[in-house]
Image (cartoon, grey):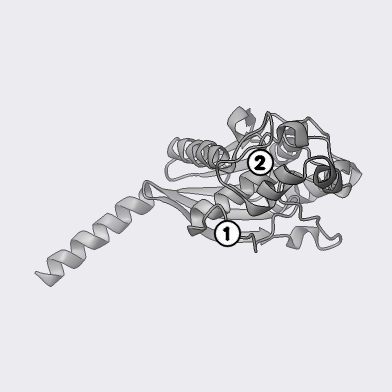
Amino acid sequence: MRSAKCARQALEIQSSLMQATRIIAIRHGETAWNVDTRIQGELDIELNATGRWQAQRLAQALIDEPIDAIYSSRLLRAWDTARAIADATGVQVQACSDLRERSFGVFQGRTFTEIEEAWPEQALCWRRREPDWAPEGGESLAQLRQRIVQTACELAQRHAGEQIVLVAHGGVMDMLYRAATGQDLQTARSWNLGNASINRLLWTPQGLTLIGWADTRHLDELATLDESNT
């Protein structure tokens, strides 16, 4: 009986692995607004010179990876990062609007200091990470999590047994990390979300699992900024 049970469990594990999708999740390269700690949200800000350098280094780091698909946010900072990977690997980038950054509504275009001064009560809700609160005209953490986890799982399901790259934003990376590690939305972040770092997850029908996070060895010549929501 025990032998039969072990055999069944082995088959279940093997079947699950055959359905698994390896995910390389990438935050875009640096922008001038990252340097200024200015909230980008869904505003379309391009990479700065450092960000373009980071994208090229990232692309070289992934050039020998077996990549079956690349999906990217349509926002220019992510799209240009993804294009660098596509040029190096020969895999075409596919646009995915649902990989966009969180909408910060009236906060977009403002620095952290400006937000604190203009909307102190809303800034307090933001600092508390209240799941259902959203800045005026923006998106709540709960809405962001639902969008990102659903999108990542849907894309991964298309590529069972393969490896895909998702290029997006700090808020997107944060939600993927939380989903893969079981972190609550209000848990204070203790993990890095550096520009152009390599993050690895595994998707199975049971959900997301963390494999590796915040690999920046390809960027050793330059420190990466770590802004969580831009």
Q: Is residue 119 above or below residue 179?
A: above
Q: From the viewer's perspective, is 152 left or right of 29?
A: left
* Quadrant in the rendering for residue 72: top right
Query: In the image, residue 82 lies at what x, y percent?
Result: 70, 38
Query: In the image, residue 169 lies at what x, y percent?
Result: 69, 42
User: Residue, x 78% and y 37% (percent of image)?
Assistant: 40
Q: Which residue is mark 1?
A: 187
Query: In the image, residue 77 lies at what x, y percent?
Result: 77, 36
Cα distance in 3D space between marks 2 and 1: 24 Å
State the residue lying farthest toward the bottom. 2
Q: Which residue is mark 2?
A: 167
Q: From the viewer's perspective, is 132 left or right of 127?
A: left
Mark drawn on residue 161: none
Is residue 201 at all visible to an observer of this figure?
no
Q: From the viewer's perspective, is 220 left or right of 72?
A: right
Number of the front mark, 2 or 1 = 1
Camera-side residue of 24 and 153 = 153
* Quadrant in the rendering for residue 138: top right
